[in-house]
Amino acid sequence: MKKIKPIVFFPPVILLLAAVIMSFANKDAFGKIVNDANTWILVNFGWLFNLSGIIFLIIVVGLYFSPFGKVKIGGSKAKPMLGKFEWFSITLTTGIAIGILFWATAEPMYHLVAPPASLGITPNSPQAAIFSLSTLMLHWTFTPYAIYTIPTIIFAFVYYNMKKPYSIGSTLYPLLGEKSYGIGGQGIDAICLFALVAGMAASLGTGVLTVSGGLSYLFGIKSNTTLWLFVDIAIVVAFVISAVTGLMNGVKNLSQINTWIFIGLAIFIFVVGPTVYILNLNVESFANYISHFLEKSLFTGIVEGDPWPKGWTMFYWANWLAWSPITGLFLGRISYGYRVKDLIMTNFFLPSVFGLMWMSIFGGGAIFSQLHGVPIARAVMKQGPEAAVYLFLSNYPLASMIIPIFIFAAFLSYVTGADAMTSSMGGMSTTGISPESPEPSMLMKIFWGVLLCVVSWVMLSFAGIDGIKMLSNLGGFPSMFLELAMAYCIILVAKNPKKFDSFKEDYTKDGKPID
């Protein structure tokens, strides 16, 4: 208790417990408050969410080719704490892994049968199929990972090269100086902590639904609050076991296992599925994604009165932004010993390419199945999005073996993510975290993990997955302004890294990084 930062720790805990109690006591009132706030934000600032995604993408690509890309995190003598495949595996499976498992087959069904009315696309048509897959590419590849990479870069540089405290407030030091510390900096940490816990609760909700949907499919168990509770408890137990082994053992080992499972599943579906169809649809959809990138990214629907962007693209950007500051703390922390250019390759480019392939294979396969008689869309509408992947996989050879493997991958994805994020959450809310002593106490990690699961189960049971998602979406609003400030700080640093870097010997006399 003596190490707790009260301004960072108590406000998000109190707010989350209040949300849980309100959702339990008065579901309708809770839903109205959260929905009204969510609608106000998206109506008035949806354009900025969309524009921010483009800005972050441009900055990340620009940094890769800039002289700043040669700067080494931790100085020229720093040795990486992870091998490149280990690093990539952790980045992939602690980011949006549970999302690609859950939504790859479910999301295209929504776009296929109900594309945006203002675009005049006929439902279930070839044009709708291309729109569905190209939209999946937009939502799950380069833009989301750019949103994650901005705070990762600035935190890694500020923490290791500028030797500033383990805090999100520290990322604003190039702009605010000493004002980024103290009460103001802790207030920023508290807001981001609330946003992440709400976002993690939503992610855990989708994870619980994915695993429960699989158990329901395999064993005929009804997917209800009781099953959700048992799955939730199992995740907590597995997370605690992983946490006890230490971050660099638990997360590292689980991430590599999960990455190989992902690769194996993708290869299997590609080989035994409609391979030629997937390749052709992927090529057409990727061309649509590239040629209409700006149009799709900046689509607000305000002129035509189309609500589609608010329910999908804007909503996703808000959700990624809610996660990004604290995700950046974790990903930045494990980037020690690598150049900024390597960081961008591993945290932005490679997982985006993996997302493209995954969405092309699973999304393209699901679209083929739907258009050729498998009623995936009907299952999504009647049973929920968690039903999509199991109905999809049930039509493939060896389904009785593949489905349990898929369930196991979903389970591991959330355990891995929870271990990584609770480490960051515990570090933010306690004192004494440094590169020499990077881990918070085990009790603090367990506290945040248990709180996450309690919040997720209660709100999933009483407010529904949409209620949790809208709550997490609210966290993306302040995070958007914070990340825009981070982006500005990166530009300041990139223009003259020697001015900010503690390792002056790594630069030439005119301030250029030594390659």
Image (spheres, rainbow, N blue to C red):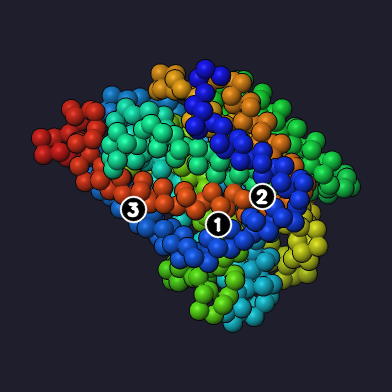
- Residue under label 3, please give it: 59
**Residue 248 visible in the displayed image:** no
Q: Is residue 147 above or below residue 255?
A: below
What is the x, y in percent for residue 191? 50, 42
- Relative horizontal placement of residue 121, taking residue 2 as reference (left or right): right
The disc placed on residue 252 is: none
Q: Nearer the viewer, residue 327 or 366?
A: 327
CA neighbours of label 3 inside 10 A, class few (<14), some (14 to 19), many (20+): some
Q: Relative to 115, is 295 on the left or the right?
A: left
Residue 505 visible, this orientation: yes
* Lateral position of residue 72 relative to residue 307, left or right: left
Tell me the kind of residue under disc 1. Tyr
Amino acid type of the residue that numbered disc 2 sits on in the rendered structure: Ile
Q: Comparing marks 3 and 1, which lies closer to the viewer?
A: 1
Q: Earlier in the sequence, mark 2 or mark 1?
A: 1
Quadrant in the picture for the N terminus: top right
For residue 352, side relative to residue 462 (left or right): left
Q: Residues within 10 Å of mark 1 (few under 14, many from 20)?
A: many
Residue position for label 1: 316
Circle 2 residues within 10 Å: few <14, some 14–19, many ≥20 = many
Dot 2 falls on a residue whose secondary structure is helix
According to the image, label 2 marks what residue? 468
Residue type marked 3: Ile
Q: Position of residue 229 (x, y in %)?
A: 79, 38
Q: Secondary structure at mark 3?
A: helix
Residue at image position (59%, 26%) is 445
Q: Are marks 2 and 3 in contact (CB under 8 Å)?
A: no
Residue 182 placement: quadrant:
top left
> In the rendered structure, which disc, 2 or 3, sits on the residue that comes first in sequence?
3
